[in-house]
Image: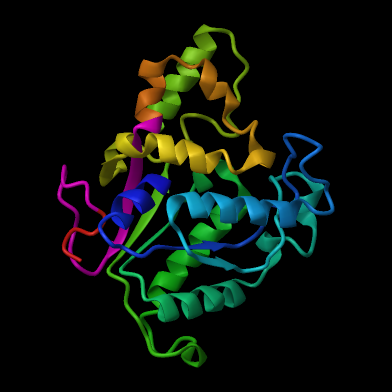
């Protein structure tokens, strides 16, 4: 959603980013960049560099440990984010929401984009925090209740995922998706906002390039014909999950409509 940060940033909107983990158990694209012992620290630095490119200056780390993918030993580690108490995580999110007072909150959809357990966990906790922050009875120690206007989920459009998967099958290229393309991302008909981010593509790419330890992520897209991947890269997709200011209007394509 870096395109949204850029688009609304030029209009004076102040954005913030909350990270539950530092990706401590992820793959390292180039062994010269990091080790298993310092990967979390390196990735925090990469994220801060990427945020600087976007003009994003409000960052919070919840300081939980990366859970890794389902079925891996890291996912069973008692320190993993997915093992953390929901009440504890929601409390931390409520504290930030009440302090920062965002009008619009965005998190992953229920698939976590591509099924990462931590993405799915933060989707659940952020959804809970959107409602809890507005309830004075919950977490009174974190300040007065605050009601954000909208909650959105963001993910890949399923139509684009399906088109890429079909092209890969036609070329006999091994499926690089972590999930079934028929279940990955948001069904096109459930997308509330197609945000056109073409004019920010170059800055988005520059920001992504800061994540050097993850340089192999999405490399398969380089092989995909431009006309197929255009829907993937030219638009950011948002599904309205909750609103206190009414529904979005089809074609409006504005996260801040009626806010």
Residue for point 54% across, 7% down: 171
Q: Residue 13: x and y, percent?
A: 30, 62
Residue 135 location, quadrant: bottom left
Percent coordinates x, y for residue 252 in the rendering: 16, 47
User: Is residue 185 in sight in this rendering?
Assistant: no
Q: Horizontal placement of 70 versus 249: left or right?
A: right
- Magenta region: 233-254
Q: In this rendered view, identify the residue nearer to me: 147 or 49.
A: 49
Residue 152 among those drawn in magenta: no
Residue at image position (65%, 56%) is 44
- Residue 141 vs 124, above or below: the answer is below
- The reply to whether residue 206 is visible in this rendering is yes
Which image quarter: residue 151? bottom left
Frontmost residue, 142 versus 161? 142
Q: Above or below — where is 125 with respect to 113?
A: below
Counting from the top left corner in percent of width and height, residue 242 is at 31, 62
């Amino acid at each position: 959603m870096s395109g949204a940060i850029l688009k609304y940033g030029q209009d004076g909107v102040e954005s913030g980013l909350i990270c539950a983990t530092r990706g401590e158990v992820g793959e390292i694209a180039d062994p010269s960049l990091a080790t298993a012992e310092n990967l979390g620290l390196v990735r925090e630095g990469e994220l801060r560099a990427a945020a600087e490119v976007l003009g994003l200056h409000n960052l919070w780390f919840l300081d939980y440990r990366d859970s890794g993918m389902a079925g891996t030993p890291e996912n069973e580690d008692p320190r993993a984010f997915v093992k953390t108490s929901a009440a504890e995580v929601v409390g931390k999110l409520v504290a930030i929401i009440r302090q920062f007072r965002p009008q619009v909150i965005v998190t992953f959809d229920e698939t976590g984009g591509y099924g990462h357990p931590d993405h799915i966990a933060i989707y659940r906790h952020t959804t809970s925090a959107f409602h809890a922050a507005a309830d004075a009875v919950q977490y009174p120690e974190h300040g007065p209740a605050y009601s954000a206007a909208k909650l959105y989920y963001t993910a890949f459009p399923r139509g684009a995922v399906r088109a890429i998967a079909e092209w890969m099958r036609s070329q006999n290229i091994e499926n690089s998706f972590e999930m079934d393309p028929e279940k990955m991302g948001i069904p096109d008909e459930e997308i509330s906002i197609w945000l056109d981010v073409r004019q920010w593509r170059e800055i988005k790419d520059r920001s992504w390039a800061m994540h050097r330890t993850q340089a192999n992520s999405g490399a398969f897209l380089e092989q995909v014909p431009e006309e197929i991947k255009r829907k993937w890269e030219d638009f950011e997709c948002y599904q309205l999950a909750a609103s206190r200011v009414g529904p979005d209007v089809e074609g409006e394509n504005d996260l801040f409509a009626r806010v």
